Image: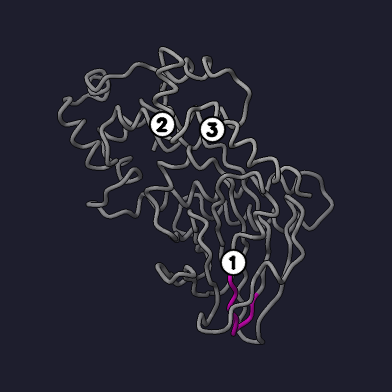
Amino acid sequence: MEALSEVLREVKLNGAAFLDAQFREPWCVVARGRLPRLLMPEATHLVHYHYVDEGSCLTRTEDGRDEASLSAGDVVVFPHGDSHLLGTDLQLAAHSIADMIRPPRRGEVARVQHGGDGAKTRLICGFLACDRELCSPILSALPPLFKVNLRASPSGEWLERSFRHSVAEAASPRAGADVILARLSEVLFVEALRCYVESLPADQRGWLAGLRDPCVGKGLKLLHGDAARAWTVDELAREVGCSRSILAERFTHYVGQPPIQYLTKWRLALAASQLRSSGTRLARVAERFGYESEAAFNRAFKREFGMPPAQWRRQQRTRAEPAARQP
């Protein structure tokens, strides 16, 4: 799992819980992207999650591709931010969660009650902002939704208690409760990811499944731990402790591309993140991420993103300006 930690370290997740909801049967609601976009307009990608503290319900992506049955202790994650339904009966007319509440300030937990007079279900809902390019290895390996049960995790009991306590604290005037809750949201997502990886079938392919393979997992850890190094497949295989042919075959089997091709895409994702967030000169960015010249960096970046890095940076800043002006 070390490679997962390396990626998450670069991704810099920014979490928030925005809704403490109590629903009573029968009920059906729809969650779309409007509310979190109001709260974090600068985010390039938003992951949605719901933690079931009490009761049970059903959930389904709005397009009907994926669905799940949820019970107390479950966390359901929508890694691609898909619009989705939640309720005891998904055939009912769905009420928009965003329309039920005043958009909360960042870090605030809004509270809502909705539904009939039957059995109660309590959800704590939130989202995490992350960089789309840096999250790509993880996101590309995840389905539209997945669920895990925290109570089956070794740290689940502690996390559940802490999460529940922090939601209650957010209603009080005590300073720092929103920051603690944001960090716990991030921990909850990481724990859900770890549980998901552990539950994958033995024949599963993809980046996350590759973490469990001794050769691929160690190779990913080395590449992410020193992305600027002028790696060759021979050097990587030697440090992993397997043959070049085995490493190349297993890496491609799980990750879908050879190690050096994967490294190139990761370097460019790191470079794009720095271009978006800083004014660092292009030559310095190129050097930092393993390119011998600015020209070589420009060519590689254009192949990946369809335009030179200077133009891409201007485009990103132009797109960010309207978001920054929103109240």
Compute the Cα span from label 2 to label 1: 32 Å
Picture coordinates of residue 148, whole percent (x, y) = 44, 59
| Local crowd size for mark 1, using a 10 Å CA cut-off: few (<14), some (14–19), many (≥20) | many
Residue 86 image position (x, y, % from top left): 54, 72
Mark number for residue 31?
Answer: 1
Along the polypeptide, which appears first: circle 2 or circle 1?
1
| Amino acid found under the numbered disc labelled 2 | Trp
> Which of pointers 3 and 2 lies earlier in the amino acid sequence?
2
Q: Given this view, does label 1 or label 3 mark the residue nearer the observer?
A: 3
Reading the image, the residue beneath label 2 is 266
Q: Amino acid at mark 1?
A: Ala
Whole-Å distance between the Cαs marked 1 and 3?
32 Å
* Residue at the spot 67% in from the left edge and 48% down from the top edge: 40
Quote the CA–CA distance across marks 3 and 2: 17 Å
The local crowd at label 2, few if under 14, some if 14 to 19, many if 20 or more residues have their Cα within 10 Å, is: many
Q: Is residue 167 left or right of residue 145?
A: right
Question: Would you say 316 lies left or right of 265 here?
Answer: right
Mark 1 or mark 3: which comes first in sequence? 1
Q: Position of residue 318 (x, y in %)?
A: 64, 38
Residue at figure coordinates x 74%, y 60% from the top left:
103
Q: Which mark, by number, is residue 312? A: 3
Q: Are marks 3 and 2 in contact (CB under 8 Å)?
A: no
Mark 3: secondary structure: helix
Task: Magenta stretch: give its range.
Answer: 23-31
- Residue beneath the point at 66% across and 73% down: 22
Name the residue furthest bottom: 117
